Amino acid sequence: MAGPPTYPGAPRWLKRSAMVAGLVALLLVILIHLGGGLHHHMPSIDDRGHNAAQEGDR
Amino acid sequence: MMAPRLRQFALTLHVASSVGLLGTIAAFLALVVAGLTSQDAPMVRAAYLAMPLIARFVIVPLTLASLLTGLVQSLGTAWGLFRHYWVLVKLLLTAFAAMVLLLKIELIDEAARLAAAATLPRAELHAAGIQLALHAIGGLLVLLVPTILSVYKPPGLTRYGWRKQHEEAA
């Protein structure tokens, strides 16, 4: 009597997509790291308020 | 399992919310591009001030509707939620997009606050706009994948789906 069929594993389209997604994610991490982070140039409202206050003092 | 009429109704809601979401993100991206490239201060101000409205009242509800109707659709039909890889990937991508969107609402509000300032802080708005553009483009690309998966329905059972299929056949 034949045993239960073995699971064929994840389909090829999924493996390839996962590989592409992984490479894109790695590329993004490297780019963000090289660029000093996405938040590097983003000031907070507090910073802005502080700057405005400083400008007002001048 | 859902009755055929109910299934069709749920599918209509799911397609409408998912495709509507893609269109709204494209419209949001148009606003971001206008805010980034326009030299006209009122146009820049209007673009950034419109973003929180679109995000809160259209994009977030459509994202949640797409996620919810997708769950109903998969749980109420033979496709199941964890049986087929394409359904599972759709769920994970939509949930990921929803999470990123909810996290970025603060950035959208921040950009609108900057745009509402008496003197337009161009450099700060530009930095915020670049981030918003990247997220909008990323969101569009990520949400295009579920659309493609829904149309092609690529084959492939998960281990759970494989076991269930053989249990049901036995």
Image (cartoon, coloured by chain):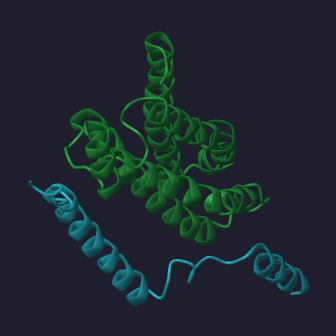
Chain colours: A cyan, B green
Q: Position of residue B156 (x, y in %)?
A: 21, 49
Residue at (64, 56) in percent of width and height = B102
Q: Residue furthest top?
A: B5
Q: Position of residue B18 (x, y in %)?
A: 46, 35
Q: Residue furthest front?
A: A1
Q: Residue furthest right?
A: A57
Total numbered circles:
0
Q: Position of residue B35 (x, y in %)?
A: 54, 52
Task: Please name whichever residue, A47 or B89, is drawn nearer the observer in this view of the structure.
Answer: B89
Instruction: Please indicate, yes or no, whether residue B85 appears anywhere in the rendered image.
Output: no
Task: Please name whichever residue, B32 or B10, is drawn nearer the observer in this view of the structure.
Answer: B10
Q: Position of residue B42 (x, y in %)?
A: 65, 46
Residue at (31, 46) in percent of width and height = B84
Q: Toward which corner of the image does residue B63 lie, by quadrant?
A: top right
Residue at (83, 83) in percent of width and height = A50
Indicate whether B169 appears above or below B12: below
Q: Quadrant of the C terminus of chain A?
A: bottom right
Q: Quadrant of the N terminus of chain A?
A: bottom left
